[in-house]
Structure formats: C-alpha cells, structure tokens
Image (cartoon, rainbow, N blue to C red):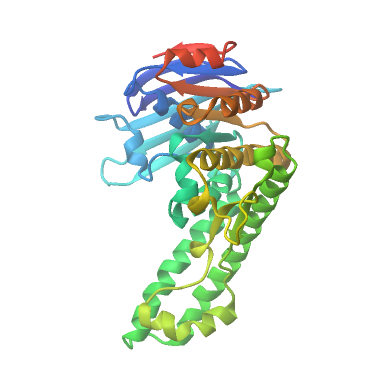
Amino acid sequence: MHLSRLSLQNFRSHQNKIIDFDPRINLIIGQNGSGKTNILESIYFLASGKSFRSSSLSQLINWNSPFTSVVGTINSRDPVELEVQLIKDPLKTSLSRKFLINKVIKTRPKYLGTLKTVIFEPEDIRLVTGSPSRRRDFLDSVFTTTEWRYASALSQFHRALKHRNELLDMIREGKSAKAELFYWDQSLIKNDNIIHDFRQKFIRSANTYFANHSDPEIKTISLNYRPSVLTQSKLDQNYNFELACGYTQTGIHRDDFAFDNSIFDASDTNLAFWGSRGQQRLAVLALRLGQINYLEEEYSQKPILLLDDIFSELDENHRHLVVNVCQNYQTIFTSAEDQVYLNLPTAQIINL
C-alpha cells in the first residue's frame, strides 16, 4: 500500500495543491516557510483526522476559507480514495469533520486505521527530556490513529475524570454526596484498564525490538514504563487527599516512561539525566523504529514514513541507518538543504 496522489484544498498555506508520490523514496525540498511540513501534516491528517503539530484543528484551514479537504489516492490491491474534510459552522465556533472512502461517508471508527503513518520530527528529542505529558501524548498517538477502541476509551476516561474532579469539589462544599462518585469511578477504572493494556503491549513490543536489533547501540536501550494503575482500592485510599485538593491522583493521566540505557554503570540509567545529545537522539530514533515495527507486526501493513527535516539532527552513521530502514517503506522526507539528496540518490525530488 502506498500514497500515489495527494490533493489539498485550503490546507494551511496550500490553497490548491496536487502532488504525485513515488512508491518508495520522496524528498520535498523548499525554503523555510514554503509549506513542506504542512504537506506531511496533511498526510497525517488524512490518516487520522488529527494534527501532529496543533491541538486546534481550526488552524488547519487556510485563512478566509470555510473548509479544508485532503484527498489521497491509495494504491493497493484495489485502489482506494480517502478524504477528510474539515468544515467551519458559520453559525457556531465549532468544526465538523467528514471521513470518506471512495466518496462514501464513513464513521470515524470505520475509517480509522485505513492508512497508517509514522512521523519523525526534530522535536521528538523532547520525548527524552521533556515532560511526562509529552510521552503520554506519544503513546496516545500510536493508538488514537489506528485503534478506535483506544480512542474511545481515552475520550471517555478524560470525560469521567473531568466530572469526577468537579464532583470532588461539590462534595467538599457540601453540595453533593460521596455516593455520587460511584458511576464516575467505574467509568475511570474500566477505561483505565483498556488504555493500560494497549500501552503495556506497545512497551513490551518496543523493548523486544530493541533487544533483538542489529545495531549494538540500540540493543542497550529500553523503555522503563511507569504506569499509574487505577483501582477502586486506590480511589478509596486516596479519597480524603483527593477531596482536599479536588483532583484524582491516579490513572493513565499520571503515566510516564523513561529511556534507559544499560551502558551506564549506575542505579539510575535514565538517558534524560545521563545521556549525551547523540544518545538521546538515537533513543528517539529507536522509539520511532519500534513504532514502525509494532504497526507492521500488529496489522500486517507497512506504514508510510514521514520525516520532517531530521537529517540535521543525526550523525552520518545514523543517517545511514534511517536510509536503510526507509528502503522498505514509502517514505516522504522534507529538507531545506539541497545536499540532502546525496543521502537519498534514488529519491523522487519534489520542489516547492
């Protein structure tokens, strides 16, 4: 399966744009501000109905336009046309999305997973050094673009969390009774279990992939998952404290993981504290490779790889590693530097 043609209408800086892609390696070259990353974002949007750059979908619509449309022609055994539309409601501030397969409107659960992508971007290094919320967002992105059950559980969990926290405030103020927590507790526990099962499965898969990798540096990397598992006994135990602060203390919204490296002769092997910049970059690259491996093993479908100006972040050895991996997938690179072509001599060049 590969993306053969992409058609954009009013997507960020691209009012009308059609691009034909090679089934293998593609290199989009253009100056900063020319819209290279916007193209990768549109492909991610076509796959998931979401953006990897912004939480506000309204930013995807070109200024002064009432809608945006992204259409992709997918070549597989039977060619498929995918389309995602994002439409402004003129009477409201809300947006509506439409998902179409061969011009037939589908529900998001029926659409999700039709096309799979993995995005590499320079900001990925913050997965090592940044906040736990960034790492949780990564775990969510693995599944919310492919698994409707995960996406639904995540939405229900955050809805229940919001209501439970509001209810804690009302109980503290004497406006509600403790018994009213029961419904929201059960919703949190059920959806927390679903999400943790998916996350733990991915962590196990990634660690197996690292341990069996041919690169000796990747072999030393592992993910140390730190789940905050929510149970009724924990909710009961924390009740007085949570009542005082008005916030639920345990659950998937408190999960985290660390990148560990066995080369450190210490009790703490977290790359965030002890790793060099190069080691941290390699760990993030390994994580994305683990994501590719997981998707391919789980769904027997090769994802499309989207690499946004990452060569500037890698040394020569790891550039070769990326190029070798990409030979087996449809890959779309972006760069502002013409000489990147030297690393990708077989690439189709797309100039912006």
- For the N terminus, give its image quadrant: top right
167 over 199 or under it: above or below: below
- In front: 237, or 90? 237
**Percent position of residue 205, x then y:** 70, 48
Q: Position of residue 349 (x, y in %)?
A: 50, 11
Q: Number of numbered discs present?
A: 0
Residue 158 in the figure: left or right of residue 263:
left
Above or below: residue 21 compared with residue 148: above
- The picture quadrant where one finds residue 33 is top left
Of all residues, the one furthest to the right in this rendering is 212
> Could you tell whether 150 is left or right of 176 in the image?
right
Provide residue 266's location: percent of width, then percent of height: 60, 58
> Against 217, is 29 above or below?
above
- Residue 73 at least partly seen: no
> Residue drawn 47% across and 34% down?
121
The vertical placement of 117 against 3, above or below, is below
Residue drawn 51% across and 13% down?
Answer: 341
**Residue drawn 45% across the image and 50% down it:** 129
Image location of residue 142, percent across then percent down:
57, 45
**Quadrant placement of the C terminus:** top left
Q: Pick the residue in front: 15 or 249.
A: 249
Between residue 323 and residue 307, name the one nearer to us: 323
Q: Is residue 164 visible?
A: yes
The quadrant holding residue 191 is bottom right
